[in-house]
Amino acid sequence: MSALYWTSKQLWRVTLASLLLVSALLASASVEAMCRDAQARTASNEKALSYFRKGETFQAAKILKVHHPSGVREVASYVKNKGMSYVIFTQVNQDCVAKFIKRTRPRAERQKHYSSRI
């Protein structure tokens, strides 16, 4: 019957060993900084606006791709400046640092056409 019951000393050793094992597993797990989608959009917009003196975003930024091994996101930011609109493409890494890739040619902003037909 003594094999079915643990003494307090044995119970203490098992508890201590399990706590050490759990803490070792938690410490060895890689804890990486993750840049969320909203933070990636904000970083991309800030990078895109840094190329213009009086630019402003006219549409929400879009995440085009997420590279799964590295976690890098490709983001498109939409900026208008002096009547011209641009799309700025950036790569945002896991630390939320945006890197410029390319931009589109400037396009004139479209005028709203109102129909005279009712």
Image (tube, rainbow, N blue to C red):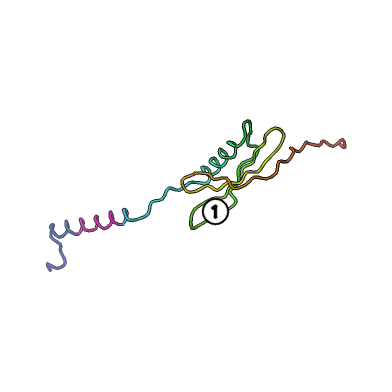
Quarter of the figure with the N terminus: bottom left
Residue 21 sits in quarter: bottom left
Residue 12 sits in quarter: bottom left
Question: Could you tell me which residue is drawn at 54 percent across and 50 percent down?
Answer: 73
Name which residue type carries label 1: Val
Residue 19 belongs to the span the image colors magenta: yes
Question: Could you tell me which residue is drawn at 19 percent across and 59 percent down?
Answer: 14
Quarter of the figure with the C terminus: top right
> On the picture, is 42 further left or further right than 87?
left
Question: Residue 68, image x and y in percent?
Answer: 51, 57
Compared to 20, does 117 lie above or below? above
Question: Residue 25, image x and y in percent?
Answer: 31, 57
> On the picture, is 98 further left or further right than 58?
left
In the image, farthest residue toward the right: 117
What element does badge 1 sit on? strand
Disc 1 packing (10 Å; few <14; some 14–19; many ≥20)? some
Residue closest to the eye, 69 or 103:
103
Question: Residue 95, image x and y in percent?
Answer: 46, 45
Question: Residue 50, image x and y in percent?
Answer: 58, 36
> On the picture, is 62 further left or further right than 2?
right
Question: Could you tell me which residue is drawn at 70 percent across and 32 percent down?
Answer: 82
Residue closest to the eye, 31 or 106:
106
Per the picture, the main secondary structure of the magenta-coloured stretch is: helix
For label 1, the residue is: 66
Compared to 105, does 3 lie above or below? below
Question: Could you tell me which residue is drawn at 65 percent across and 43 percent down?
Answer: 87
Residue 86 belongs to the span the image colors magenta: no
Q: Read off the magenta span.
A: 14-24
